Structures are given as C-alpha cells and as structure tokens.
Image: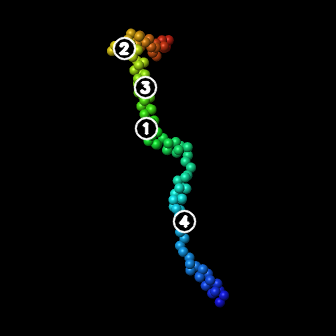
Amino acid sequence: MEENKDIDKILQSLDGIQKASPGHFFYTRVQARLQKEEKSTWAQLASFLAKPRVALSTLFIICLLNAAALFYQRHALSGLPEQTEQGSADDYNTTLAANTYYDENTEAR
C-alpha cells in the first residue's frame, strides 16, 4: 500500500505541470549571438571594400590617375620631333647596324 501512496504522490505532483517555453526575446538573443561571430581580417577588409561609398571613391581615384597618366604622356610626347612615314635616318642606321647570327660566325667556313 505504501508503494501506491508514493506513486499517487508522484502522479499528483505532475498535475500542475505545463509545457516549457523559452523566455522573452529568446530567439532574438540567439540570433544576435550567432551573428556576433568573429570575422577574419580578410572578411572585414572585403566588407569594408564592398561599401558603395568606398567602391565609388576608389573607382574615381583610379579614373583620375588614368587621366593624369594620359595627360602626362601627351605632354611628354609633345616635345618630340614628328616622324615621317618612312622613318628617320637614325632608325634606318640602327636597323642595319644590328648584328645577326651569320655575321658572328664567319670562321665556320
């Protein structure tokens, strides 16, 4: 009989039981903790460069450097004398003065 009383006490203690539920904002806290993961240096650099403000300013600087290089090249070339279609005499003489394989091996015959 004592076993029945013990079993009855145990079963009566379970009468007021309710389904377990998470606390308030549990899902939000879990999501925040998951997103708080440490990012590598490369991931941080990539996220910084992917910002529109940084990407557009970098593109602008590259275009500005290209324009400056073109301007400098035109300015440097403007001081050179113009060549004719046939080329200059210096170019012709330089071509003739180039050594060839046959010129260097005259002893073979």
First in sequence: mark 2 or mark 1? 1
Kindly report the distance in space between the C-alpha atoms of the residues bearing marks 1 and 4: 45 Å
Contact check, label 2 and label 3, Cβ < 8 Å: no
The secondary structure type at the circle numbered 3 is: helix
Task: Indicate the amino acid at tag 3.
Answer: Ala
Residue 90 place in picture, x, y as percent: 41, 10
Kindly report the distance in space between the C-alpha atoms of the residues bearing marks 4 and 2: 84 Å
The secondary structure type at the circle numbered 1 is: helix
In the drawing, what numbered circle is on residue 68?
A: 3
Direction from residue 64 to residue 13 in the image, left or right: right
Mark 1: few, some, or many residues within 10 Å (few <14, many ≥20)?
few
Q: Which residue is mark 4?
A: 23
Kindly report the distance in space between the C-alpha atoms of the residues bearing marks 3 and 4: 62 Å
In the drawing, what numbered circle is on residue 82?
A: 2
First in sequence: mark 2 or mark 3? 3
Q: Is residue 29 above or below residue 20?
A: above
Task: Indicate the amino acid at tag 2.
Answer: Glu
Q: Is residue 72 above or below residue 99?
A: below
Residue for point 39% across, 10% down: 89
Judge whether residue 96 can be spotted in this image: no
Query: The N terminus is located in which quarter?
Result: bottom right
Task: Indicate the amino acid at tag 4.
Answer: Gly
